[in-house]
Structures are given as structure tokens and as C-alpha cells.
């Protein structure tokens, strides 16, 4: 309980400070989240959904927290240019967990679309925030969600009104910047009203070679006939710990394409909970992991078919080298009345070294009888015959290995609907496999 006690004491001693530097809509649920966290504690490996990652150990170090919302000296628009060629975006920054408001994109989205600090939105649109904030991210069911809810003071709010289509990709770059080892607790609230459409790109990067621990909770509400593409790209460093819980709720005839790409990291734990609340909806959930050294990536998903006539597709692929550890656990839950469900779940893994480890656990839990559901996983190494074939045709063995690994993960990248982003990722993935610097050449911040 030592890991929990330091944060329980911290909250009790700094409760007023935390609330004073946040907004009422976030503070309303803070005390309940604290009680839920105090009752549960950090999840151990005995908790089914957390058995592949030692969560309490990650919170043992003494991290600083910026509870008084002090500014860090960074000007991201001048120093960071994470451009995707041929992709028109409205670019926003979050420095640690604070939405950067000193300079906003010149190209405004218009049509009633809001991209703002979550704290500002809670003051300017309290009824919208109160209706949605911390509703599908249930603090009683997940201790890390409770932990984030009790400490988060800001984040990002994205709102797309009824029947409005965002004509530019909304790009949010999360920059970790500090002079000391730092913990960051960030929230994201996404609301797409009926008939709305939006494409979003979230990029996680670090500006300092320090120890960071980030907890992030994303809540996304996708209304009737709405469409959301949510791309999450992590490209940090080996001292970074990232814990991200994504909650998505889909209404009738809605569509979601969720892609999570881990190119470079330290320890990463991604959780996705998606629930169908309206018939005729579909989702495509894809993941790509490239890890080596002692990196650790754990993806855990639950797709809840609460109503019938919905379709879900999952494809997660891992390439692990050296002593890297990967884990995938995915549950497809089909409730009793969810007839005519179509669901497919695939996890494929490539261990490029005998010292790499993968844990895979695809699962079906079906209570309806008129469904088409499938799940499967594979674990293997590089095909010796293919390597021999390529070497016989003059291709160096190392190059042949890279080509096979690159071809293996391409299937996930090609499922992205943003063609410029897809092309950019092909380039970054190739550089990642070659061990080259995997940052944009134009990014002065990361040099």
C-alpha cells in the first residue's frame, strides 16, 4: 500500500490547491474518484486486466506534480514542427497536461467546432461538460481512471456540432517538458453530435531526457450517424511511462476507426473500452507495436456489443526484438439481445529475437445465438526460408530481415484512412527498424 499512501496523503494535503487551479465541472467528481481510488488501490497483477504490467511498481518513484499550474519555458509553435507532408491540419499543443493557449492555429475550424482547454470549456460550456465528463470513464470500475480523475486539472476538449464535418484534421501534440522527473495527469473529452465527422491525430513526444509518468483518460462520444477517426501515435523515449485509458461510446449507425501506434517508448499500457449503444454501428480498432531493448507495451481491449446489428474489427500486430515484452488481451463481449453481431479479432506477433516475449489472450464472451464472431492469435519468428530466398538474390541478411518486418506491420498502417499520415508512418516505421532517429528532421525540439 506504500505506492497508494503517498498519493492518498498528497490529495488530502493538496485538495484545495488542486481544485483552485481547475474548474467546477472537473472538481465535482474529484472527491468521489478519490474515494474510489482509496478503496481499490493500484491494480496488481492479480487483477485480470492488469496481469501483464506491474502497475504499483511504476508509481513507486518520487515524481513531481505541477499542481499550481506553473508555466514551463517552451514555445512549441516556434520549436516543434511535427508536420505530415500533404496533410492539412489544425495544430494544437498540450505541454504536459496544460492546453497551450498563448498561440492558436491561424486556420480556424469554424462551423461551431470547439477545440479548447478542458478547464476553459468547463467554465464556458458547463452544461456540456457536466453531461459528459467522467460518465463512461467509470471510476468505480478502474482504479487508474479514478487516480487520473482525482488529480487531472486540465486537458483537451473537442466538440463537433450536429451535421458538421471538420474539413481539416485536428492534430494535438502532447509534449512532456520539465526540469525534474514529472508525473502528468491529462484528460481528453471528445464529443461528436449527430451526423458529425472528424479526423484526429494525437502525438506523444518528449522534450527532455528525464523520467516521466503520464496517465491519460480519453472519453469519446460518437452520436447517431457520426464518424470519428482517432489516431494515437507514441514516439517518446525509454524513460517514459505512459498509461492511457480510452473510452468510446457509439450511438446508432455511427462509425469509429481507432488506430494506436507505438513506435518508441519505455513502458506503455493502453486500455480501450468501446461500447455500442445504438444498432447499425461499426468500429475498426487497430494497433501496431515496434519494440526492442527492454521496452514494454501492453494493449488491453474490451469491445462491448450491448445492442444488435453492429460490427467490430480488431487487428493488433507486434514486432519485438532484444528483450522487449509485449502483451495483448482483447475481449469481445456480446450481450444477450445483441443478435446479428459481426465481430473479428486478430493478434499477430513477430519475435525477432529469442529473448523477446509476447503474451496474447484474445477472448470471446457471447450470450446471443445469432452472431458471427471469430478470434485468433499467432506468434512466430522470421521465416528462414524467406530470408534464404532473399539472400540468394543478393539482398543482405540484415536488409532482408528489415524488409520482412516492414511488410509484417504494413497491414495495420494501411488501414488508416488518412493517406498522408499513412505515407508518413511508412517512412517513420522504416527508420525505426533501421535504428535511425525516428523524429521529424524539422523538429528542433527533439534534436
Image (spheres, rainbow, N blue to C red):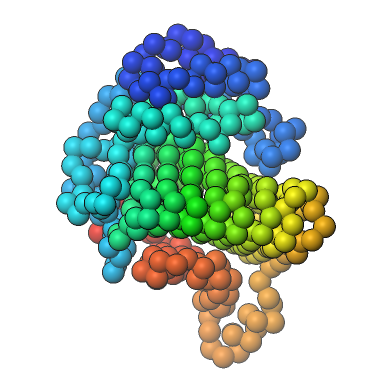
Which residue lies at the image location 30% right of the left edge and 61% below the top edge?
167
Q: Residue furthest top?
A: 13
Residue 211 sits above or below residue 92 on the image = above
Which residue lies at the image location 73% right of the left edge and 38% below the top edge?
48
Residue 27 sits above or below residue 396 on the image = above
Which residue lies at the image location 34% right of the left edge and 55% below the top edge?
164
Q: Residue furthest bottom?
A: 393
Q: Nearer the viewer, residue 400 or 171?
A: 171
Q: Position of residue 425 (x, y in %)?
A: 42, 65
Q: Position of residue 336 (x, y in %)?
A: 78, 48
Q: Nearer the viewer, residue 344 or 386?
A: 344
Taking the image as shown, residue 330 lies to the left or right of residue 163, namely: right
Taking the image as shown, residue 419 lies to the left or right of residue 269, namely: left
Q: Position of residue 440 (x, y in %)?
A: 32, 59
- Asked whether residue 289 is in view, the answer is no
Q: Quadrant of residue 104?
A: top left
Q: Nearer the viewer, residue 317 or 87?
A: 87
Q: Quadrant of the N terminus?
A: top right
Which residue lies at the image location 26% right of the left edge and 38% below the top edge?
100
- Asked whether residue 108 is in view, the answer is yes
Q: Quadrant of residue 284?
A: bottom right
Q: Position of residue 86 (x, y in %)?
A: 28, 69
Taking the image as shown, residue 260 lies to the left or right of residue 143, namely: left
Number of marks drawn:
0
Amino acid at each position: 500500500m506504500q505506492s497508494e499512501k503517498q498519493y492518498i496523503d498528497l490529495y488530502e494535503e493538496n485538495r484545495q490547491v488542486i481544485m483552485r487551479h481547475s474548474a467546477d465541472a472537473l472538481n465535482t467528481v474529484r472527491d468521489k474518484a478519490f474515494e474510489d481510488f482509496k478503496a481499490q488501490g493500484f491494480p496488481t497483477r492479480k487483477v485480470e486486466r492488469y496481469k501483464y504490467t506491474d502497475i504499483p511498481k511504476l508509481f513507486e518513484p518520487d515524481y513531481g506534480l505541477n499542481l499550481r499550474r506553473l508555466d514551463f519555458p517552451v514555445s512549441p509553435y516556434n520549436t516543434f514542427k511535427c508536420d505530415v507532408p500533404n496533410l492539412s491540419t489544425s495544430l494544437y499543443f498540450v505541454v504536459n497536461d496544460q492546453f497551450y493557449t498563448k498561440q492558436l492555429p491561424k486556420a480556424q475550424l469554424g462551423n461551431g467546432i470547439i477545440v479548447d482547454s478542458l478547464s476553459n470549456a468547463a467554465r464556458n460550456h458547463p452544461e456540456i461538460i457536466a453531461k459528459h465528463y467522467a460518465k463512461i470513464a467509470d471510476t468505480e470500475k478502474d482504479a487508474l481512471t479514478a487516480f487520473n480523475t482525482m488529480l487531472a486539472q486540465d486537458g483537451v476538449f473537442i466538440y463537433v456540432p450536429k451535421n458538421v464535418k471538420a474539413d481539416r484534421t485536428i492534430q494535438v501534440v502532447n509534449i512532456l517538458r520539465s526540469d525534474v522527473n514529472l508525473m502528468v495527469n491529462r484528460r481528453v473529452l471528445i464529443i461528436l453530435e449527430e451526423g458529425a465527422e472528424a479526423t484526429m491525430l494525437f502525438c506523444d513526444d518528449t522534450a527532455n531526457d528525464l523520467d516521466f509518468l503520464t496517465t491519460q483518460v480519453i472519453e469519446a462520444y460518437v452520436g447517431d450517424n457520426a464518424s470519428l477517426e482517432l489516431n494515437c501515435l507514441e514516439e517518446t523515449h525509454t524513460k517514459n511511462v505512459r498509461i492511457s485509458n480510452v473510452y468510446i461510446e457509439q450511438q446508432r449507425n455511427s462509425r469509429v476507426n481507432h488506430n494506436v501506434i507505438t513506435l518508441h517508448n519505455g513502458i506503455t499500457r493502453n486500455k480501450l473500452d468501446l461500447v455500442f449503444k445504438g444498432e447499425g454501428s461499426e468500429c475498426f480498432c487497430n494497433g501496431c507495436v515496434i519494440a526492442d531493448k527492454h521496452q514494454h507495451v501492453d494493449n488491453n481491449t474490451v469491445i462491448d456489443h450491448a445492442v444488435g446489428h453492429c460490427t467490430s474489427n480488431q487487428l493488433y500486430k507486434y514486432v519485438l526484438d532484444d528483450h522487449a515484452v509485449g502483451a495483448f488481451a482483447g475481449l469481445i463481449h456480446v450481450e444477450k439481445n445483441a443478435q446479428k453481431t459481426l465481430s473479428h479479432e486478430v493478434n499477430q506477433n513477430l519475435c525477432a529475437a529469442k529473448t523477446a516475449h509476447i503474451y496474447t489472450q484474445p477472448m470471446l464472451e457471447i450470450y446471443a445465438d445469432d452472431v458471427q464472431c471469430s478470434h485468433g492469435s499467432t506468434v512466430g519468428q522470421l521465416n528462414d526460408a524467406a530470408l534464404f530466398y532473399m539472400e540468394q538474390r543478393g539482398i543482405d541478411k540484415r536488409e532482408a530481415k528489415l524488409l520482412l518486418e516492414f511488410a509484417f506491420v504494413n497491414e495495420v498502417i494501411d488501414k488508416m484512412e488518412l493517406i498522408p499520415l499513412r505515407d508518413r508512418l511508412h517512412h517513420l516505421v522504416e527508420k525505426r527498424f533501421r535504428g535511425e532517429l525516428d523524429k521529424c528532421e524539422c523538429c528542433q525540439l527533439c534534436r
